[in-house]
């Protein structure tokens, strides 16, 4: 089992992760990440490199995607997380589908589809984050544990091709940089919690502003999956390092205490169990 | 050139029939099972069977959405359901799950599988992959510009479906959990609370940037693509889709009729003049909608595509549905909807015929009492109409 971490805007470098994580998720083209230049440093620090192709692919991107995949194939890359089916088609044509890890954020919610994608030759799949602990266990059990689980960090709530920040700034006459690195926070008019909106050239992304840190459940899921992902996007580096250190020492005897200490160490942060106990099956 | 199919939504059997009468080539419905609108659906299995029969009698097709993003618990009984749909002659299912396409192809092979927009297919490589998995058609993501749609059409022979009218998801369809997170309602299982349309304060760390009178929102204007039909028609798009499975009969009749007329003109090789377009756009405006934009079709994603003020166009023009016409007395029996009064100018429209106006002079109750006005919906009244109308025509107020 591996722990892999993403580094978007959290001031961490691969060297910081040495001995704490097994791999790092980097990206360049077709990705919200733009840190593939850290590849060498990651390898030097003994980290496996995973590449994220998390953005949606348009027709005019296909040629470049093929070239990108052919370059990736020549590198020491442990896996490629992807979201758009075009990546699977092109990788299959190049015989490199076994490098792929299917992560469509929300669309992989059952054992049938997970097994289907594994049958297409991908090495692993990332089930949707909005699944309960029991649902995740079922998928893990039904698919021989060939799944990666994003258990830690903020969750992506929405991805859009729209320019949410730029459009609003134009509408409201606000002089601000929509591409500010850490993005902006929004709060629904009748709620207290805030969400982070980050805009890049290709998309707007809305993140939860709280931090999933299910310590006890991590121990239960650990033997059932292939990798655990810590989403480091826009998070406080100290929080991420603290969690990574905790995971090194975690056992069933200290999980609850360590979780309590985490909250006490960072009282301004909200740590949650994400959807593990929140069944989102309400309908209209 | 193969004709573009006009595909309309329907929430119940009556609306499915209305869509077909008013010119839809195909109708998509959600059953009470496995559909994103399952809770709102009025389609019992017997209604689906009747809708299929009606569609086929009228040379139309009927599609059933099986488009929730399934959790393991939702999959029970799906095989039997697909076999049932096949047995009653449903033409296609609209489906998100590639795993389920495989099951459908194995156990209900006569059902076409149309890949739902929930999957956000945006390029020919995805379309080709889906085709190799058994897809018969793919509904393209609404994020594509006309130019991008054209690029996809050139690179795949899989039949493509494109949205031309109705509400838009602000985010990539299927990749949004705003509603899940904020309300525990699963957007991918028919529970979306439309959280993208809510209003939000916007902060740069602690400092509020938003104007409290005009808050931030992710909400989108509705799509209206009348002016783009000529190009979509030229590209040979297999199906042009209208959104709105929760909408009224009046909406369906108005919108389907407008697009039907445009498509008929294009099929006949006629030019679509500026005047024509202005007329059709004014017709489309008569149905309830939010302010319109052309979505991503023009390749722009600026503020004019967003909706910051809640300004839904709630119309009260729909006076009633014609149930029968007595040509001897010039009286139409209508089922009322919105208020109207003697002296109002009304307009009658129906499938495949022009709008006709008259000034209302006489209204009678079912017991033949003369009335001056009506305020009660779903009441049966007789209206003196100075020209022939027929069952299924609709009457609306002219502003
Ligand atoms: S919240 Fe908006 S964007 Fe998200 S699923 Fe619902 S309608 Fe679509």
Image: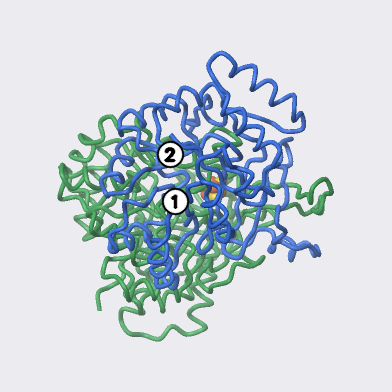
Q: Are marks 1 and 2 in contact (CB under 8 Å)?
A: yes
| Residue at the front extreme, as displayed | A44
Query: Does B234 appear above or below B159?
Result: below
Instruction: Say which residue appears at 50% left-offset and 35% top-offset.
Output: A130
Q: Earlier in the sequence, mark 1 or mark 2?
A: 1
Q: What residue sits right under mark 2 in the picture? A: A148
Chain A visual colour = blue
Left of A123 or right of it: where is B103? left
Chain containing mark 2: A
Query: Does A144 appear above or below B278?
Result: above
Q: Find residue A258 and report its horizontal and vertical position in percent.
A: 64, 21
- The kind of secondary structure element at disc 2 is strand
Q: Find residue A110 and report its horizontal and vertical position in percent.
A: 36, 36
Instruction: Say which residue appears at 58% left-offset and 53% top-offset.
Output: B316
Left of A282 or right of it: where is A96? left
Asked if labels 1 and 2 share a chain, the reply is: yes
| Residue at the right extreme, as displayed | B207
Q: Which mark is residue B356?
A: none
Q: Find residue B376 and report its horizontal and vertical position in percent.
A: 55, 42
Q: Nearer the viewer, residue A142 or A23?
A: A23
- The scheme the figure's colours follow is by chain
Chain B visual colour = green
Q: What residue sits right under mark 1 in the picture? A: A81
Instruction: Say which residue appears at 51% left-offset and 52% top-offset.
Output: A43
Chain containing mark 1: A
Q: CA distance from mark 1 to mark 2?
A: 10 Å
Task: For label 2, count other residues whose C-alpha is less than 10 Å away and answer few (under 14), some (14-19) or many (20+).
Answer: many
Q: Find residue B176 and report its horizontal and vertical position in percent.
A: 52, 46
Which corner quadrant holds the C terminus of chain B?
bottom right
- The kind of secondary structure element at disc 1 is strand
């Amino acid at each position: 089992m591996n722990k892999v971490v993403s580094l978007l805007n959290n001031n961490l470098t691969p060297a910081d992760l040495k001995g704490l994580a097994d791999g790092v998720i980097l990206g360049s083209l077709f990705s919200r990440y733009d840190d593939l230049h850290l590849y060498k440093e990651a390898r030097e620090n003994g980290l496996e490199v995973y590449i994220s192709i998390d953005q949606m692919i348009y027709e005019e991107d296909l040629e470049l995607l093929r070239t990108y995949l052919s370059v990736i194939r020549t590198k020491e890359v442990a896996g490629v997380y992807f979201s758009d089916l075009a990546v699977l088609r092109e990788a299959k044509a190049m015989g490199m589908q076994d490098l792929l890890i299917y992560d469509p954020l929300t669309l992989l919610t059952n054992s049938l589809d997970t097994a289907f994608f594994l049958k297409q030759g991908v090495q692993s799949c990332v089930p949707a984050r909005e699944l309960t602990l029991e649902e995740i266990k079922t998928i893990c059990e039904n698919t021989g544990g060939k799944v990666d689980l994003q258990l830690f960090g903020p969750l992506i709530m929405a991805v859009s091709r729209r320019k949410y920040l730029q459009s609003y700034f134009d509408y409201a006459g606000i002089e601000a940089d929509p591409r500010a690195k850490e993005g902006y926070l929004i709060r629904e008019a009748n709620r207290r919690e805030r969400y982070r909106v980050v805009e890049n050239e290709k998309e707007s992304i809305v993140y939860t502003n709280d931090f999933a840190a299910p310590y006890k459940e991590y121990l239960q899921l650990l033997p059932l999956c292939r990798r655990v992902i810590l989403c480091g996007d826009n998070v406080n580096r100290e929080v991420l390092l603290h969690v990574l250190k905790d995971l090194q020492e975690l056992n069933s005897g200290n999980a609850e205490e360590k979780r309590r200490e985490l909250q006490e160490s960072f009282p301004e942060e909200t740590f949650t169990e994400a959807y593990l106990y929140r069944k989102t099956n309400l309908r209209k | 050139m193969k004709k573009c199919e006009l595909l309309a939504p329907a929430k119940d059997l009556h609306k499915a029939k209305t869509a077909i009468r008013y010119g839809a080539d195909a109708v998509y419905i959600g059953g009470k099972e496995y559909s994103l609108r399952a809770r709102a659906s009025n389609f019992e299995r017997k209604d689906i069977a009747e809708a299929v029969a009606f569609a086929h009698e009228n040379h139309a097709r009927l599609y059933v959405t099986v488009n929730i993003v399934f959790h393991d618990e939702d999959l029970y009984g799906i095989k039997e359901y697909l076999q049932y749909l096949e047995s009653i002659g449903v033409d296609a299912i609209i489906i998100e799950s590639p795993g389920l396409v495989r099951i459908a192809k194995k156990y209900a092979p006569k059902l076409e599988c149309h890949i739902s927009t929930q999957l956000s297919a945006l390029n020919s490589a995805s379309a080709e992959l889906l085709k190799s998995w058994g897809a018969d058609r793919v509904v393209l993501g609404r994020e594509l510009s006309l130019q991008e749609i054209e690029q996809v059409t050139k690179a795949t022979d899989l039949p493509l479906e494109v949205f031309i009218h109705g509400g838009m998801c602000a985010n990539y369809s299927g990749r949004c959990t705003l509603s899940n997170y904020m309300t525990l309602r699963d957007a991918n299982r028919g529970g979306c609370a439309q959280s993208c349309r809510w209003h939000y304060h916007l902060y740069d760390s602690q400092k509020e940037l938003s104007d409290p009178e005009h808050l931030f929102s992710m909400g989108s204007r509705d799509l209206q693509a009348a002016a783009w039909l000529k190009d979509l028609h030229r590209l040979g798009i297999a199906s042009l889709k209208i959104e709105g499975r929760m909408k009224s009969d009046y909406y369906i009749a108005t919108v389907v009729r407008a697009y039907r007329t445009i498509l008929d003109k294009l099929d006949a090789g006629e030019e679509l003049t500026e005047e024509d377009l202005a007329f059709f756009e004014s017709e489309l405006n008569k149905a309830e909608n939010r302010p319109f934009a052309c979505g991503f079709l023009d390749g722009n994603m600026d503020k004019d595509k967003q909706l910051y003020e809640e300004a839904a166009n709630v119309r009260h023009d729909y006076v009633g549905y014609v149930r029968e016409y007595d040509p001897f007395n010039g009286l139409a029996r209508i089922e009322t909807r919105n208020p109207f009064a003697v002296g109002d100018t009304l307009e009658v429209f129906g499938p495949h015929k022009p709008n006709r106006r008259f000034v209302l002079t006489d209204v009678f109750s079912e017991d033949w009492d003369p009335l001056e006005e009506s305020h009660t919906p779903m009441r049966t009244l007789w209206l003196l109409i100075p020209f022939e109308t027929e069952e299924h025509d609709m009457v609306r107020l002219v502003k």
